[in-house]
Image (tube, grey):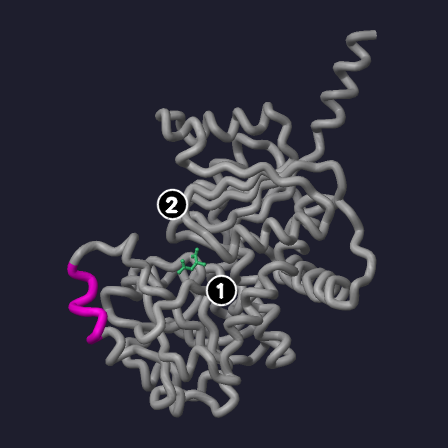
Amino acid sequence: MVRTRLSSIKKGRAKLPRNLTAIRLLHKEEICELLDSSADFKARVIDGKAIPSLGKKVVGMLFFENSTRTRVSFEQAAHYLGLKTANFSAAGSSMSKGETLKDTILTLRYERLDALVMRHRASGSATLAARYFNGPVLNAGDGQHEHPTQALGDALTILERKGSLDGLTVSIVGDVEHSRVARSNAWLLSKMGAEVRFVGPRTLVPTPQHIGMLPGEVFHDLQSGIQGADVIICLRLQKERMQEGMLSSIGEYAKLYQINRDTLRYAKPDCVVMHPGPINRGVELDDAAADSERSAITAQIENGIFVRMAALNWVFGENDMGPRAVETPDKSAKKAVKAK
Ligand code: MLT
């Protein structure tokens, strides 16, 4: 009797978890599936139509770094899908008593949480969490590595404005070196057929050695970097991850790389201006660019909810692609470059 029960418990646990740790690990078909489902959830929420409930599941929200947009939109997404959330932060958890991330994740696994949404300052932490949690893990930003749901929200926003990603020129301007948003966006956009450019000072764009592993071309001059661009994604200067001496002064950075009425003249007239937030107004972009009709910044925030609904729905769905958390050297980098 006992044996039968135990074997059925084991059977119930055997299903492979589906994770969303990195855009780099997704196939183009999976990105399309996530974007279609995001658009569908958006229409349902806006039209007040029924939303299928994922019911009776508890999602752990582990934010070990500050967040407003990502955290609130994951909460909203979970709420629309009928999920419960359990909140953790570094200060309030046993990590403040010296517990390792691995032990924290194992604890949450045996507390029987159904999924984890995690933000952590260490690159690769989401992959580590996926290994030990053994259930769906959604990366809400891991160090300088990836921020997959931000890229999905940005892609949905661009699709709404431009109708397609294929063939667009997208300039990612600013602190590329420290930006997980830049990396996830570059992977997603290049897999979907866009031309990606990284624009910024030498200290803030990856070195030639690293850029070989990212799908995009480097420009140090703003004018040529945004010339003819369909979309400009401005990035925040990530001072918390910067070594001293990487910038001579904020004023000089703004003078050379700020997106404003003057510099926007180099891009296409209908160029869309984006920023993942939080914005340093007057540094990365001025008020005129941030609040103009070309700006899609508020749409990016709102779309964050719908892509996170799609992401939660996706990780709990049928898994026919196998586990996708562990980074194995794949050929997608080269394929992505060729896809341009
Ligand atoms: C992030 O968490 O990476 C943000 O969305 C962008 C930023 O912090 O600059």
* Tag 2 secondary structure: loop
What residue sits right under mark 1 in the picture? 185
- Would residue 270 appear left or right of 174 to someone viewing this image? right
* Tag 1 secondary structure: helix
The residue at the point 63 percent across, 53 percent down is 76
Q: Position of residue 113 (x, y in %)?
A: 62, 32
Q: Few, some or many C-alpha atoms within 10 Å of disc 1 (few <14, some 14-19, many ≥20)? A: many
Instruction: Report the span colored magenta.
Output: 245-252
The residue at the point 70 percent across, 66 percent down is 39
**Residue in the foreground of this view, choosing between 29 and 89:** 89
- The answer to whether residue 5 is magenta is no
Magenta span: predominant SS is loop
- The answer to whether residue 251 is magenta is yes
- Checking the image for residue 337, the label placed there is none
Q: Looking at the image, is mark 1 or mark 2 earlier in the sequence?
A: 2
Q: Is residue 94 visible?
A: yes
What residue sits right under mark 2 in the picture? 121
The residue at the point 51 percent across, 30 percent down is 105
- Would residue 213 appear left or right of 202 to someone viewing this image? right
Q: Is residue 298 above or below residue 245?
A: below
Alpha carbon of mark 1 to alpha carbon of mark 2: how far?
Answer: 19 Å
- Would residue 48 appear left or right of 29 to someone viewing this image? right
Q: The N terminus is located in which quarter?
A: top right
Mark 2: amino acid: Arg
Mark 1: amino acid: Asn
The residue at the point 62 percent across, 40 percent down is 85
